[in-house]
Image (cartoon, rainbow, N blue to C red):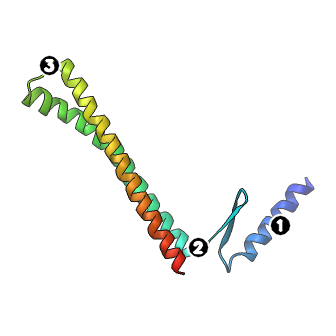
Amino acid sequence: ILLPALLVNLTWQSLHHSQCCGLLLQAGDAYSVFTTSRNEGSLTSTLRTLLFFTALMITLPVGLYFSSKAYIFEGTLGMSNRDSYFYAAIVAVVTVHVVLALFVYVAWNEGTRQWREGKQD
C-alpha cells in the first residue's frame, strides 16, 4: 500500500514541477514535451478531421451504394436486381478506399504542418 501512494506523490510532484515547461510524457524510452496551448489546438484540429472523415466513411459509401443501385444500374442501365447489387457494392468499396486515401493525405499534411510549426518555436 505504501508503494502506490509513493508513486502517486512522485507523479503529482513531477507534474506540478513541469507545469511551467509543458507536460512531460513518457512512451517507452522516448520522451516528448508538449506545450499545453499548442497541444489543445492540435487536438481540436485532429478531432475535427477525424469526425469529418468518420461521417464521410459512414454516409458516402452507403448513400452511393443505394443511389447507384437504384438510379444508375437499375434505372439508367436497366440491369437486373442481382447484377445491380454487385456493381453497387463495387462503387461502395471504391468509395471507402477513396475516403481512406483522402484521410491519410489530410492527416499526413496536417502532421507535417504541425511538426514544422513546432520546429520553428
Closest to the observer, 95 or 119:
119
Give how far apart the Cα atoms at labels 1 and 3 are: 70 Å
Which of the numbered marks, if any, corresponds to residue 33? Answer: none
- Amino acid, disc 2: Thr
Name which of mark 1 and mark 2 comes first in the sequence: 1
Q: State the residue position of label 2.
A: 36
| Residue 68 appears in the figure | yes
Q: Is residue 66 above or below residue 34?
A: above
**Label 2, residues with CA under 10 Å away: few <14, some 14-19, many ≥20:** some
Q: Is residue 29 left or right of residue 93?
A: right
Secondary structure of the residue carrying tag 3 is: loop
- Please tell me which residue lies in front, 12 or 38: 38
Residue closer to the observer: 108 or 76: 108
Q: Earlier in the sequence, mark 1 or mark 3?
A: 1
Q: Quadrant of residue 119?
A: bottom right
Neighbourhood count class around disc 3 (C-alpha, 10 Å): few under 14, some 14–19, many 20 upward: few
Q: Amino acid at mark 1?
A: Leu
Q: Which residue appears at 38% of the width and 56% of the height?
A: 105
Circle 2 or circle 3, nearest the eye: 3
Name the amino acid, label 3.
Answer: Ser
Q: Secondary structure at mark 2?
A: helix
Image location (x, y in percent) of residue 118: 53, 75
Q: Horizontal and vertical percent for residue 14?
A: 77, 71
The answer to whether the residue labelled 1 contacts the one labelled 3, judged by CB atoms less than 8 Å apart, is no
Tell me the element at label 1: helix
Measured Cα–Cα span from mark 1 to mark 2:
21 Å
Q: Position of residue 55 (x, y in %)?
A: 35, 48
Which residue is pictured at 34% across the width and 41% down the height?
96
Q: In the rendered view of the protein, which quadrant contains the C terminus?
A: bottom right
Q: Which residue is mark 1?
A: 10
Please state the horizontal and vertical placement of residue 63, each as a whole percent of the image.
25, 39
* Numbered label attached to residue 80: 3
